[in-house]
Image: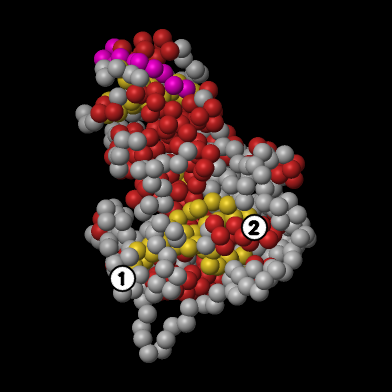
Amino acid sequence: AGPSSVCWAQAGWHPRGLREPAAGMGGGKTRWSHIKDHNIVWLTSPAGKLTDEAVREALTPVGLQVGRVLWPEEMDSANHLELSIPFFSEEQLGAAHQLGPVGLNVILSFNEELRGTMAKLNEEAVLCVACTGRPGALANSLLLVGAFLLLERSMSAEDALTELFPAGPGVRPPSDIRFPRPWSHTPEFSEDSLTLEDCILGLEVAVDRGWLSTDSLPGPDSLSVLSYDAAHICTIAVAEEGTQGVGAMSLWVAADPVTTVKDPHSRPDPSEVVLTPKSCSTPSSRRWSLNLLHSPTSKHSEDVQECDPEAVWRKRAPKRTSSLGRLGDSFLKKTAIPSKSAALIATSSKERPADLPTFARWLTNTLECRLIVRANHSNEKGLPGGSYGDFFDRWGVKQLDVPFADGTAPPNELVQKVVKHVKDVLLILQMGARGQTADSPCSVVLHCKSGLGRSMLLIGAVAVAFTPGLRASTYFGWARLVRPGSIQTAEQERFLRAMDEVSIFTRCFRCFRPASDES
């Protein structure tokens, strides 16, 4: 019954990840799910790779004519269903190399190949996307198919997940398919681990809010890590005061620039005096507020026209005492966070910026950067010559230092500080001081040592504060796709999950929660 024909209802997912896929999939039986309206079959063969003929023989009795069989584990476009991160080795990445999730560049590359393959099939034939029982293959192949349905076939995340996980006896929800923390040698899962559902919902939010446009999807190469080891994460839109225009500010993440440039020791003053932008002043005679805009078709929040991001953050900030108390010792487990591999940096095929002045010009000329936020300490191991001091201030980019320990979550007061400074930048934008438009947004760049842990948490907190109704769990899913390997430790995962938890003592922000949660 329902839109999908299924033959894997008794599969039984492992609630902490797919560490034992063969046993979990019913003693090696082939399982499949048919997305009828889109001529796609997803199939898993835990016993090993099947021949194309064996796949056809298995599906012919139920009336399915198989035109092509694709095994993403053998395809370059799917990166063989393995996670790779520039500047880091497979050994550093640990269990996540095999288990994923794969990054956004892989999703888009596979999406393009799948679209081209289906265009060559006749109308009666189905395309079968198949995987073996190798750890990570099942979860990542489902991610690729779900992303294709969302990006290429314009399905909602809810519908895509329903097609792949139709209700039935023994079928666990996609929230039970989890991905391990990166950088751990052995797979480590917890109740806070990233789920397949987070990834699909996060991808939908990115499309819905314009962080990723399906009208002009960029190619895989443009979404890979840039030579500046930076990535655009999300955008905040505001209405410019007194106009009908819309302004936008982008949030970018980066590694500490001294780990990226070829010569981190060249730190001269600019040849001409550069004035560093000051914070926005708020006249006492007038109440200034932000008009935060939403996509007209937003499915994830109510259209709240006016709010105070600082107040939003105070409501959404994790309650540390209660959160720590129920997690026990596993929450405090020390995780080794690797630095970039010097050998991989040296042999990188991408041309790195020459020095810090080159990086500064990229910030001002390309990103229109109005604020750079540094979350790492200046003397951390792995920073050649130490961090850059006040270099960018001297080159006309306002700096904000909010250092905290690597692998940990930010104190709430530091997040509050970042939110206030970002609010100042947005107020200038909203008042039309810089005449920005949605097509040429200014930006705020946040970084830590590697641009994977602390800075990505801060961006998540800022995104939640400035995007009414945004769930941290959907940001989590998007973050791991757009910046693979991010959110590095159990403590950082808990920080994001805690933002979505509503305490009985703080019934937080009903007006900023999705309408479906009102009951």
Q: Nearer the viewer, residue 500 or 455?
A: 455
On the image, which quarter does residue 329 sit in? bottom right
* Quadrant the N terminus occupies: top left
The residue that appears at 52% across and 62% down in the rendered structure is 368
Q: Nearer the viewer, residue 18 or 256?
A: 256
The residue that appears at 45% across and 55% down in the rendered structure is 234
On the image, which quarter does residue 283 sit in? bottom left
Q: How is the image coloured?
A: secondary structure
Query: Whole-percent x and y of residue 356?
Result: 69, 59
Q: Which residue in the rendered view is the most extreme toward the bottom?
A: 285
| Residue denoted by label 2 | 359
Residue 65, magenta (yes or no): yes
* Quadrant the C terminus occupies: bottom left
**What amino acid does circle 2 point to?**
Phe
The image shows residue 41, relative to residue 398, as above or below, that is above
Q: Nearer the viewer, residue 157 or 324?
A: 157
The residue that appears at 37% across and 80% down in the rendered structure is 288
Direction from residue 363 to residue 121 in the image, left or right: left
Cα gap from disc 1 to disc 2, whole angstroms: 34 Å
Upstream in sequence: badge 1 or badge 2: 1
The image shows residue 135, relative to residue 193, as above or below, that is above
The image shows residue 306, relative to residue 179, as above or below, that is below
The image shows residue 167, relative to residue 395, as above or below, that is above
Query: Whole-percent x and y of residue 419?
Result: 48, 70
**What amino acid does circle 1 point to?**
Thr
Q: How many marks?
A: 2
- For the residue carrying disc 2, how many other residues have a C-alpha within 10 Å: few (<14), some (14-19), or many (20+)? some
The residue that appears at 40% across and 72% down in the rendered structure is 432
Q: Which residues are magenta?
A: 61-71
| Residue denoted by label 1 | 243
- For the residue carrying disc 1, how many other residues have a C-alpha within 10 Å: few (<14), some (14-19), or many (20+)? few
Residue 209, magenta (yes or no): no
